[in-house]
């Protein structure tokens, strides 16, 4: 087993353990599926399982999309939900705290490392890919708003995230926040593409270590006799 495969198996295991703890902490088996965190980690786990056991290698474009979604999960959680607090503040070795830490910090960091340093032969996605990657977050937004409109007030996670709460901000306010987030997500996607380009450039600049020439063991040359 290569160390790349071992790293990906650890990523899959981290996502799986985090999802199990999250499922155990949210009661109904359907509740976790509402969360972008759970959906993005399921996508991540499925993608890397495919890479580990699949015969066909998925495209770099698809890998970039999956990486972007899990990075969104980590950044939104850290800056919008946790207000930039230390990720270790609510960490515990069991229960919901461990699940949150694995799904919002461990899997995003491991996915970014994989994006930058593995699959070096795959072509870097074009800049326009970041716009295509926006399709899923926008689809999630539509799902969250339609679901919230259909559920009665007071329902569990009627709007999964506070910035999607139509009752508090109205559709106009949510639309403005969604537009701002969409711009941030496109810039974030382009940032991932740029970082991958820098990593590719750095790897090409590393010195190539050619095998040294065999040492001359014949001793000093004997001057030719006249």
Image (tube, rainbow, N blue to C red):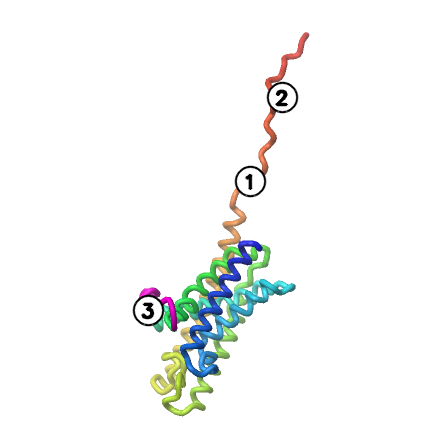
Number of on-image labels? 3
* Distance of label 3 from label 1 (alpha carbons): 47 Å
Q: Residue 108 falls in which quadrant of the image?
A: bottom left
Magenta highlight: main SS: loop
Please tell me which residue lies in front, 197 or 81: 81
Q: Earlier in the sequence, mark 2 or mark 3?
A: 3
Q: Earlier in the sequence, mark 1 or mark 2?
A: 1
- Badge 3, how many Cα within 10 Å: few under 14, some, many 20+? few
The verdict on residue 57 being magenta is no
Q: Nearer the viewer, mark 3 or mark 1?
A: 3
The stretch in magenta equals 83-95
Q: Which residue is mark 2?
A: 218
Q: Which mark is residue 171?
A: none
Q: Which residue is mark 1?
A: 209
Please tell me which residue lies in front, 90 or 122: 90
Say which quadrant the C terminus sits in: top right
Q: Residue 103 falls in which quadrant of the image?
A: bottom left
The verdict on residue 90 being magenta is yes
Instruction: Assign a secondary structure to mark 3.
Output: loop
Q: Give the residue furthest to the front.
A: 94
C-beta proximity under 8 Å, tags 3 and 1: no
Instruction: Assign a secondary structure to mark 2.
Output: loop
- Name the residue at 50% across, 50% down: 202
Q: Which residue is mark 3?
A: 90
Q: Is residue 187 something one can see in this rendering?
A: no
C-beta proximity under 8 Å, tags 2 and 3: no
Q: Is residue 18 left or right of residue 60?
A: left
- Badge 1, how many Cα within 10 Å: few under 14, some, many 20+? few
* Distance of label 2 from label 3 (alpha carbons): 69 Å
Instruction: Assign a secondary structure to mark 1.
Output: loop
* Distance of label 1 from label 2 (alpha carbons): 26 Å
């Amino acid at each position: 087993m290569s160390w790349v495969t071992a790293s990906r198996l650890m990523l899959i295991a981290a996502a799986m353990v985090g999802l199990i703890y999250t499922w155990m902490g949210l009661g109904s088996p359907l509740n976790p599926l509402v969360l972008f965190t759970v959906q993005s980690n399921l996508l991540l786990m499925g993608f890397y399982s495919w890479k580990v056991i699949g015969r066909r290698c998925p495209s770099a474009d698809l890998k970039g999309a999956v990486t972007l979604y899990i990075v969104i999960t980590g950044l939104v959680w850290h800056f919008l939900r946790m207000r930039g607090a230390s990720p270790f503040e609510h960490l515990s070795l069991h229960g919901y705290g461990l699940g949150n830490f694995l799904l919002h910090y461990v899997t995003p960091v491991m996915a970014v490392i994989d994006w930058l340093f593995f699959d070096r032969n795959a072509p870097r996605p074009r800049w326009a890919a970041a716009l295509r990657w926006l399709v899923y977050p926008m689809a999630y937004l539509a799902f969250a708003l339609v679901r919230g409109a259909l559920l009665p007030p007071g329902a569990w996670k009627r709007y999964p995230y506070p910035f999607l709460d139509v009752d508090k901000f109205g559709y106009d306010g949510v639309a403005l926040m969604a537009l701002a987030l969409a711009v941030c997500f496109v810039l974030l996607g382009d940032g991932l593409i740029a970082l991958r380009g820098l990593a590719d450039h750095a790897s090409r600049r590393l010195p190539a270590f050619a095998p040294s020439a065999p040492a001359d063991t014949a001793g000093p040359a004997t001057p030719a006799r006249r």
